[in-house]
Structures are given as C-alpha cells and as structure tokens.
Amino acid sequence: MLCKVHLTSHSRMSGSRADPYTFPPPPTKYLPIPSKYTVGTQTDYRDAEVQTDPYSPEYVVCQDSIPELLTLATLTWGRGLPAGQAEVEMIERAREKRAWEDTLPPLSDTSQFEKRRRMMNAMERKEWAFREQEIEKLQEIRLEVLKELLKKRDENQNEVNMARLNAQWSKLQEAKEAKLAQIQRKHVSAIRKLMGKGKNIEGKLERRNIIKDYCDYASQVYGPLSRLGRFPDNNSEDFVVKNHYLNTYEGLVELESCLPDFVTQPRIKPPKPKVTTTKDGFLKRAARVDRELAEVHKALLEKKNKDFEAKKPMRFLQRKPVPQPRLPTPTLEMSSNEEEDIEMAVIYLQKLLRGRVVQNMMFEGKEKRLELIQELRTSHALQEDDRLVKKAEKQVTLALQRQRNLHEHKVSLVENHLAGLEGRVLADMFDFLSKELVRLQEERRVHALAMLAERQRRMREAEESGRRQVEQRRLQEEDQIFKEVIKVHQSTVTSYLEDIILNTEENTAEEQARAEIEKMAEEINDIAYEMESRRTQLQSEEIVAELVYSFLIPEVQKDFVKEKVRNSQRKHILAAHQIIHRHTEDMLKTHFVEQRQTPDAELLEGETEKEQNT
C-alpha cells in the first residue's frame, strides 16, 4: 500500500484579531516548526476516478454455504462493473435458472427421468431462443453502425465530389471569362475598324479640320489616345513651378517676415472650466455621468494592469519538505529559591512590557482612526429630536432631488421629442431637395443628350438617304445588265442542264441497280449454298413447299393487283398525255411563227436604218 502523507498546519488565526503578546521573530537560519500536524492518507485503493480497480477485502466462506454474491466473481471493474441493465437481466436469469434447477427431479429417481428430460429440453429451447434474440440485437446494432459508416462515407464522397465540381466550375469560369475578354477585345477592334471604314465611304478622304478639332474638347488635340503613340504626361516637367521663395531657405525666411504676428505666434486662450454644479450646489447629471464613467474606467484599468497572483501550489498530492530539526533548548538548572524569584520577576517584567506594547499599538490605531471615531460619535450620540430633524431634512432633500429629477426627465423627453420631430422634418426636406436637384440635373443632361442625338441622327439619315439613292440607282443598272445577260444564255443553259441531268439519272440508276442485283445474288447464293450443305430431305421438301407458297401464290396475286391498278390508271394517263401533247403542239406552233416573224422585222429595221443613213 502506497501512502502519501500530507502535513498541514493546524493553527489558523483571524487577520482582524491581534495577538495579545508580541514575541520576537525567530532567527532566519532555522525554519519555524508548527506546533501541531494534521496527517492525511491517500491510498491506491480509494473509490475515486483516479483509481483503477476498487479494493476488495479478503473473505472467508462458511462451511456448507454458497453465497449468491460469489456467483458474480467473474464481473470485474470495467467488465460488467458498475452493473447496468444487461448485467441486472443476466443476474435475474441466473436466479431463475437456479430456482428452476431446484425444481428438477433428482437423478436417483428413475420414475421421473422422462419428466426431467422434458424439462431440460424445454429449458434448452428457451435458452436457444434467448440466444437468437441476442444475436439478432447484435446484428441490428452492427447494421446500424454499418449504415452510419456508409452514410458518413457517402457524405465524404459527396464533399469530395462537390469540391472537385467547384474546382472544375471555377476553372471553366476562368476559361469563360478569358474567352469573353478575348471576344470583347476583338469586338472593340472590329467596331473601331468599322467606324474607321464608315468615315471613309467610297474612298473619299476628308482633310483635317483644325478649327473643328480645337472646338471639340473630346478630340485628339485635348485628349490623345495612348494607343496612337501619344502620352500627354511625357513633358509634365515643363509645368513644374520653380520658385525662389519655396525652394530656398532665404526665400522662406523672407516670405515668413511678410506674414503677420498672429500667424507665427498663435495666441491660445485657455478654455473656461465647465460648471459642474448648479446654483443650489447639486452636481449636474452630465458631470455625474462623466465622474461615474471615469471611476469605471479607472477600475477597469486597475483590474487590467493588476498583476496576476501566482497560483497557489496544490494542497494535496504533493510532498512537503521536512523542516530541519530544531536545536535543543538549553535548560538552566536552579540552584536556589533566590534565583527562582529573580526569574519570576523577569517573566513578570516581560509581561508588563508586552502589555505596554499592545497598549501603544491600540493607541496608535485610535489616533489613526480618530476622525472616524468622532464621526461615529456624532452620528450615534445625537438626541432623539436631533435624529428626527435630520431624518426630516433628509426626506425633504430626497423629495426635492426626486422632484428635480422628474422635472429634468420630463424636460429632456420633451426636448428629445421636439428634436426628433425637427430632425425628421429637416431630413425629409433636405432629402426631397437633394433628390429634386439631382433629378433636375439629370433631366437637363438627358435633354441635352437627346437634342444632340436627334441632331446627329438627322444628319446621318440625310447622308444615308443620299448614299442609298446612289446605291439603288447603281443596283438597278447592274440588275438590268444581269437580266439581259441571263436572258441571252438561259435557253442554252437550260437545255444543257436537262441533258446532263437525264443522262446522269439513267447512268446512276443503272449502276445502282446492277450493284444491288449483284449484291443480292451473292447473298442469296451464299445462303443457298450453306443451306444446301446442311439440309436434309425433309428440310428440302419443306423449303420447296414454302417457296411455292410464299413466292408463286403472292407473285400471282401481285401481278393481278398490278394489272388491275394499271387498267384503272390507264385512262388517266391517256387523258394527261392528250392534254400535254395538245399544249406542246400549240406552243411549238407559236414559237415557229415568232421565229419566222423576227427575221422579217430585222430586215425591215435594217432597211430603215440604211434609208436614214442615205
């Protein structure tokens, strides 16, 4: 058993009560030895959280007795102890089993052997059922744990996926922003080029109008663009002011001598002290609040700047140093009664001196607290009438203070309310005026911009209408020339294209038909050869029957249907052919007549021209 001894001092004296005697201090060479010790022990077998196993004392079992407590010897601290609900149920089941074992018939009785066997079988089934329930509970607990683990894994995977998606999204956003910036730069460059081309329509360059450039403050003269190679701040050193009075000490002294006296020698008037008391001698509320705030601030600073006290060492669980043994007290042997009387006289004199010292201490304390004692005497030694008068004066003073506070509170409430109303009205008025000013400025600015835009729009519309008319006339001339050219070559191109299309269609159809027929013949031959190599007599007969049934009969029906459809459509085809041939013959006749008339007209025109020339 490991014991730790703690020694504590038993002498505890009150700080407010002084010792009746003052002894001289002991020498610093030797440590003071306390008069009494309090010994405390702490063992490893104490029932506390710091111990591992509780202490179990030794025991003796009486003969022919089996205590029920010994059946729980398998339970140890941390493995069943302290007992919970499961342990209590186990103990109850053990008790029931022991009671059941007591009810079993003895083995010596052979007549009740069958009954014993039935009872044991029933108990065994009951135990097996209980064991199955425990196994099911364990499986359910494991399933819950597995579900929690799976859920946590899914959450972690989702977090990883979200982080990955966020990273990918941020990367795509950066690429998108870079692409948009590139497109914007290209757009600005293209717009600038189009504006440059728009200023030089039809290749007609305009000369620079210097007067217009200097009248327009947004032109390149006043605000040149850096991308055109002009940097307005290059020659900024030319505008630096170099003054003698500002760059030299002599100039500063001369400049200072010209200044008046109140600039170099300021006259500061000390501020008047604020009046913190009223006419009646009471302290004002603002001054009282300031004083309270100053006291709170001072207390906070003292608490903040106060050094933290060193932590006291732990009272328990530590080893205290053993003081050095005190030297033995010398003894004086008394040889006679006369020496004993002298010693008693010396002791009595010491007591008188110590009493005088205590009296001097009390007198000094009384002198230090004399004002407090006098105040207590004046406050407690008054007569009953004086006390009543003082109490009445105090009540009157408190009533006056309370009335004055209520009056000040009412006045402050009224002033606050009026100030709030005035501030609200002024704020609304200023807000309305500022908004109206901004609105008026914006309205004027928008009106000026609208007028400029309208003027520019009209100028551009006039220029655009002139260009549009010229362009329309030119397009009409080109369209007429194109129509004449196309009209000359239209008939030749049409006939040529018709011949090409017809020949191409015939050749393509013939090639496709040949290729499809060859492909189908190869596939049918492959299938037929494969079937020929594998089929039997019955299969051959079955194939022939199917061919006859699926080819000959549908083909006859198909030919019958085609002939029927052909007969029904023949009358329509004949009618269409008649109409087409009749119209084509009329067109050919008219075309032939026109061709015969055109040479005659040309001859007549040639003769008229010759006559005019002659």
Image (cartoon, rainbow, N blue to C red):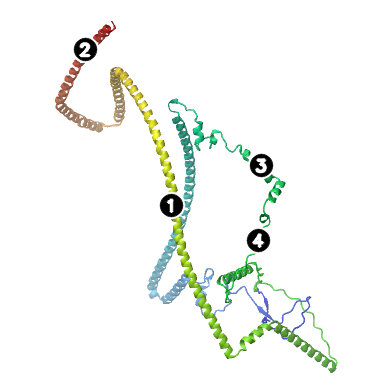
Front-lying residue, 272 or 442: 272
Report the residue marked by disc 1: 436
Q: Secondary structure at mark 4?
A: loop
- The three-letter amino acid code for the residue at tag 1 is Glu
Q: Are marks 3 and 4 in contact (CB under 8 Å)?
A: no
**Residue 292 position by quadrant:** bottom right
Report the residue marked by disc 2: 597
- Considering every residue shown, the one lying at the far bottom of the view is 337
Q: Is residue 357 left or right of residue 378?
A: right
Report the residue marked by disc 3: 242
Q: Is residue 319 left or right of residue 229?
A: right
* Residue at left offset 29%, top offset 30%: 531
- The three-letter amino acid code for the residue at tag 2 is Gln
- Considering every residue shown, the one lying at the far top of the view is 614
Q: Are marks 3 and 1 in contact (CB under 8 Å)?
A: no
* Residue at left offset 43%, top offset 49%: 440
Q: Are marks 2 and 3 in contact (CB under 8 Å)?
A: no
The mark that comes first in sequence, 3 or 4, is 3
Q: Nearer the viewer, mark 4 or mark 2?
A: 4
Q: Give coordinates of residue 572: x percent, y percent.
A: 15, 26
Q: Give coordinates of residue 126: x percent, y percent.
A: 40, 69
Q: Secondary structure at mark 2?
A: helix
Front-lying residue, 104 or 563: 563
Q: Secondary structure at mark 1?
A: helix
The mark that comes first in sequence, 3 or 1, is 3
Q: Nearer the viewer, mark 2 or mark 3?
A: 3
| Disc 3 to disc 4, C-alpha distance | 36 Å
- The three-letter amino acid code for the residue at tag 4 is Ile
Q: Are marks 4 and 2 in contact (CB under 8 Å)?
A: no
Report the residue marked by disc 4: 268
Q: Secondary structure at mark 3?
A: loop
